[in-house]
Amino acid sequence: MLPERYLGAHGSFDATYHVRLGDIGQTWEIRATVHGVRVRRGVTSRQPDVVIGTDAATWLALRSGKITGIEAFSQRTLYARGNLDLAVGFEGLFRLPNGRDPRQRVREIEVGRHRISTLTMGDGPDVLLIHGLGATKASFFETAAALHGEHRIHAIDLPGFGSSSKPLRGAYDAEFFADCVIGLMDRLEIDSAHIVGNSMGGRVAIEVGLRQPDRVRGLGLLCPAVAFVRRDLHPVVRALRPELGLIPHTFGRRAIESQFWSLFSDKDSIDPSLADIVVDEFQNTYRSPGARIAFLSAARNIYLERPFGDGGFYPRLAQLEPAALFIWGSDDRLIPPAFARHVAKWLPSASQIVLEGCGHVPQVERAQQTSDLLRSFFGDIDALSTQPRAASHRRAA
C-alpha cells in the first residue's frame, strides 16, 4: 500500500531503501523518486541508500501510526544504516491509513541562503533541539521521542553539519548560528519556543536568548560550551586557519570512535550500535569541504571566545532574561561542571543540576533523567508563566 499513500518528493529526490523484517526473514526494496514509489519483494543489484531493520509487529505499528520511527529507534526495536536522514525521513514520505498526516517529517527549510534540515514531530508548545560540535540532530532522538507527546519538537542540523547546507564562507560562531535559528523560527511561524542545546548547541541557545528574549520561553542547556576561563593554547588556536578544511583529509575510524566513547562516563549504558551510526554519519559528512571548514571554524570560535571584559561571554550572560536550566555532567572532560560556579556568579537566577556519573552528552547517557528534568522545567514555565526561577545548584544521583 506504500505507492498509493506516497506524498511525493521534490527536486531530484531518488532514494532506495531496503526494509528487513528479521523475524519473518523478508526484505523489501523500496525506491522513491519524484515520480512515485516502486516496491519489490527481495532485492536487486541496486545499492541501497538506507537499510531499515525491524520486526513485523513494529512495522505494523509504524504503518498504523501507533508509534513513530524515532520512538522505535529509541526503544531499540528498529535500526538503520546508511544515510540516517533518509532513514528518519522515510515515514514522512507516506500518509497514514485513512489519509492522516505522518507523525514525523524531515524537511529542508530555506533560511536566507541556507538550508536547514529539520525533524518535526509531536504537538504542543514548540521545542527546538540544537546539537553540539560534530554532531547532528540524531543526538537528540531520545529527547524527541520522550517529549513529543506534550510538545511539538523541531530537531535541527545547524548549517555546516548533518544534512544542512555547508557554506564555505559561513562565520560558524554563536551569532551566525543564532541568526539561523531565529530565521528558522520565522519560517516555521514559531512566535516563541523552548530551546534545548547540548555543548555548542547550548551556546547557540544562549545567544538566541540574549538576542531575542521575548521569543524564548525557557532554555535547557546541556553541558553548554560556555567560554573557557583558562586559555593556555589561545595563541596556537588563533594561528590555526579553518581554510585548511579545503584540503581533502579525514579522521581515521578508530580516532572518531575513541572521541565518541570519550564523551561518556558510563560506557556500558551506551548501545554499541550507536557508535557505528555516529561514526558512519560523521565520516560521510566530513567528506565535504564545507563540513570540514564548519567543524574547524566552530571549534576555533568556541575556544577563542573572550570570557570577560567588554562584550565578553560572562558579562553578557548576566543579561540573559529567559529562565535557564543548566545540566552538567560530573565526569564531563570537555566542559567540566566547575563552570557552574561562573554561571552562578554571573547568572544567579539560573537553575543548575549536576548529574553524577555522566559525561558530556546527558541526553544520550542519561536520556530518561534528562528528559524528565526538561519536561518538568518546561512544564512549570508553560503552566505558570513564571519569571526566571530562584537560583538552585544541586547534585543529582
Image (spheres, rainbow, N blue to C red):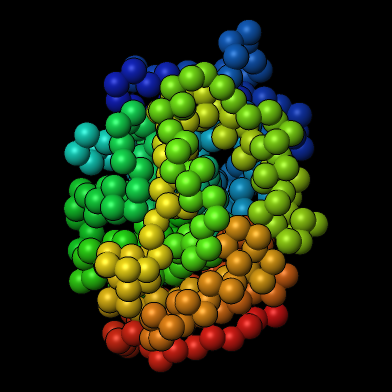
Left/right of residue 245 with respect to residue 179 in the rendered view: right
Please tell me in which quadrant of the rendered image residue 172 appears.
top left
Seen from the viewer's position, the closer of residues 388 and 29 is: 388
In the image, residue 89 lies at what x, y percent? Answer: 45, 37
Please tell me in which quadrant of the rendered image residue 10 appears.
top left
Q: Is residue 305 above or below residue 288?
A: below
Seen from the viewer's position, the closer of residues 190 and 87 is: 190
In the image, residue 90 lies at what x, y percent? Answer: 48, 35
Which residue is depicted at the point 40% across and 65% down?
Answer: 307
Seen from the viewer's position, the closer of residues 185 and 255 is: 255
In the image, residue 335 lies at what x, y percent? Answer: 57, 62
Q: Is residue 60 visible?
A: yes
Q: Which part of the image, by quadrant, shows the C terminus? A: bottom right
Which residue is depicted at the point 47% across and 77% down?
Answer: 342
Seen from the viewer's position, the closer of residues 295 and 2 is: 295
Q: What is the residue that sits farthest to the top in this orientation?
A: 45
In the image, residue 297 lies at what x, y percent? Answer: 42, 39
Q: Is residue 147 visible?
A: no
Which residue is depicted at the point 39% across and 56% down?
Answer: 305
Please tell me in which quadrant of the rendered image residue 253 appears.
top right
